[in-house]
């Protein structure tokens, strides 16, 4: 397989781009963390990318946070955790799916999403299914992580029951997972189990103090991301932001 393309987002954050979707690598004071892990079968390429970015030939992966249970986000998590001993974190409601204990609930598609769903799956690469992955810590709303700065967990159900976002207040960074996308336009995510909850999740994230927003699909917004999110939230209607 070809090397994973990387794109620097901030001085300490890089986007890892896959054939479908993307993950993010964050430089910690003592290693790396990953927000999502991309498609199945890409663990070695992810580690090679971290070694390139580190510049020392070392890929000291400490934490993996899975924003939700879909294949293009958890795909390489089990292999990465096995190879590095990284601690795996995920939203509590998605943890049984990620562990392989229960099947993935299917999305409830809007009529306009059906052809998009068909097109996405027609173009998916031929990949092995993701193996069950241990979840070492089940995350709930308001939990925090220490990555040299506080990372706050925001439970944003709707795309999946256990979808989470990560907010780094000190640096104004937000990782939305698939609750928000930036594909051709900034918008709520698609292929959801509960679209009404996703709209509420959009409003909740738009109310945060954010300068940089990193999405599961689409280019990150660097600078002014909070105002961009609030502008779309006003168009969507609903809770004031």
Image (cartoon, grey):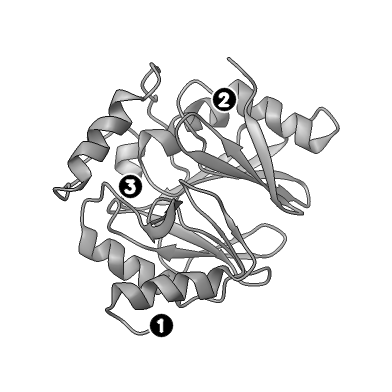
Circle 1 residue: 241
Report if the CB atoms under discs 2 and 3 are less than 8 Å apart: no
Circle 2 residue: 43
Say which label, 2 or 1, has the lower sequence index: 2
| Location of residue 144 (image quadrant) | bottom right
| Location of residue 239 (image quadrant) | bottom left
Return the x and y of residue 93 as percentages of the image width and height: 30, 52
Q: Alpha-carbon neighbours of circle 1 within 10 Å: few (<14), some, or many (≥20)?
A: some
Say which label, 2 or 3, has the lower sequence index: 2
Q: Residue at x 18, y 40 (%)?
A: 114
Q: Alpha-carbon neighbours of circle 2 within 10 Å: few (<14), some, or many (≥20)?
A: many
**Looking at the picture, does residue 197 appear above or below residue 43?**
below
Image-based side of 8 in relation to 208, left or right:
right
How much space separates mark 2 and mark 3, taking CA atoms?
21 Å
Q: Residue at x 38, y 59 (%)?
A: 187
Report if the CB atoms under discs 2 and 1 are less than 8 Å apart: no
**Residue 139 visible within the image:** no
Of residues 128 and 28, the one nearer the viewer is: 128
Of residues 192 and 165, the one nearer the viewer is: 192
Helix, strand or loop at mark 2:
helix
**Looking at the picture, does residue 1 appear above or below residue 211?**
above
Furthest toward the left, the residue is: 111
Circle 3 residue: 94
Return the x and y of residue 180 as percentages of the image width and height: 41, 57
Helix, strand or loop at mark 1:
loop
In this view, the mark in front (3 or 1):
1
Q: Quadrant of the N terminus?
A: top right
In this view, the mark in front (2 or 1):
1
**Residue 16 visible within the image:** yes
Q: Alpha-carbon neighbours of circle 3 within 10 Å: few (<14), some, or many (≥20)?
A: many
Say which label, 3 or 1, has the lower sequence index: 3
């Amino acid at each position: 397989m070809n090397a994973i393309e990387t794109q620097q987002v901030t001085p300490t954050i890089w986007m890892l781009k896959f054939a479908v979707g993307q993950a993010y690598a964050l430089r910690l004071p003592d290693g790396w963390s990953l927000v999502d892990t991309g498609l199945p079968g890409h663990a070695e390429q992810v580690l090679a990318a971290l070694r390139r970015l580190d510049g020392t030939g070392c890929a000291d992966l400490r934490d993996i946070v899975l924003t939700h249970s879909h294949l293009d986000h958890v795909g390489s998590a089990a292999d990465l955790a096995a190879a590095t001993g990284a601690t795996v974190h995920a939203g509590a409601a998605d943890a049984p799916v990620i562990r392989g204990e229960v099947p993935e609930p299917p999305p409830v598609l809007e009529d306009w999403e059906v052809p998009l769903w068909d097109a996405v799956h027609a173009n998916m690469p031929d990949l092995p299914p993701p193996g069950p992955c241990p979840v070492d810590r089940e995350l709930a709303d308001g939990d925090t992580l220490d990555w040299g700065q506080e990372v706050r967990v925001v439970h944003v159900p709707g795309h999946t029951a256990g979808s989470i976002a990560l907010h780094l207040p000190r640096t104004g960074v937000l990782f939305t997972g698939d609750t928000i996308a930036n594909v051709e336009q900034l918008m709520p995510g698609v292929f959801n189990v509960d679209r009404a909850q996703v709209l509420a999740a959009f409003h909740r994230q738009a109310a945060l103090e954010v300068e940089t927003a990193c999405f599961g699909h689409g280019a990150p917004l660097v600078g002014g991301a909070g105002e961009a999110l609030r502008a779309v939230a006003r168009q969507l209607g609903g809770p004031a932001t």
